[in-house]
Image (spheres, rainbow, N blue to C red):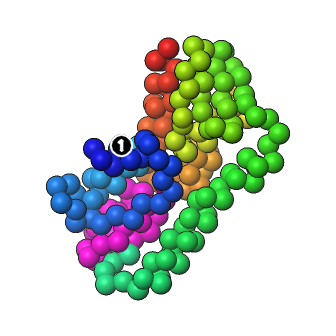
Amino acid sequence: AEMHQILSEYDINLVIMDINLPGKNGLLLARELREQANVALMFLTGRDNEVDKILGLEIGADDYITKPFNPRELTIRARNLLSRTMNLGTVSEERRSVESYKFNGWELDINSRSLIGPDGEQYKLPRSEFRAMLHFCENPGKIQSRAELLKKMTGRELKPHDRTVDVTIRRIRKHFEST
């Protein structure tokens, strides 16, 4: 519950998580994290068996490091991961001359990364929802594949059983259904 609250209140860029957590398995928590947000995710854990590594990466972890570890290696891996994920789409966003997109009484505000409803209510969008909405606004009427959307939203390649796009679209729809 605490993770969900923090993710909704702050713009988190990187999560470094252990599999062995008190109360809840880190693999399950990572799956929930992937459903809620598209942040860079690294496992840092004492579990070094192949099954856990494969599961962690299949769930959507971007990296898997086992203990004991070299702190400099962790720092470099985290920095490289952040540089890839943070730079995704920033060039086009910086060069964009449009400040907002308006459609059916709604407005997507680029600067505040918010969706504004017909009633004036403002919804601050998490990074993945914002990138998906921005992509839809910039490509109206174009049919998008899951793989294209995931690449635009996170920079990741689509993997089997990856529900990130579905969850993100469901969350976007909730904004429209709430009015």
- Of residues 80 and 149, the one drawn nearer to the viewer in this rendering: 80
For disc 1, the neighbor class at 10 Å (few under 14, some 14 to 19, many from 20) is: few
Q: Quadrant of residue 96?
A: top right
The image shows residue 30 at horizontal and vertical percentages of: 34, 54
Q: Which residue is drawn at 27% across and 59% down?
A: 26
Apparent side of residue 179 relative to residue 105 in the rendered image (left or right): left
**Residue of label 1:** 5
Which secondary structure, mark 1? helix
Residue 40 in magenta stretch = yes
Q: In which quarter of the image is the N terminus?
A: top left
Q: Which residue is drawn at 30% across and 66% down?
A: 18
For the record, the magenta segment spans 38-64
Look at label 1 and name its amino acid. Gln
Residue 71 in magenta stretch = no
Above or below 160: residue 9: above
Residue that sits furthest to the left in the current view: 23
The image shows residue 2 at horizontal and vertical percentages of: 30, 47
Above or below 70: residue 148: above
Q: Quadrant of residue 49?
A: bottom left
Above or below 15: residue 131: above
Q: Can residue 132 be seen in this view?
A: no
The image shows residue 167 at horizontal and vertical percentages of: 44, 37
Q: Which residue is drawn at 42% across and 57% down?
A: 60
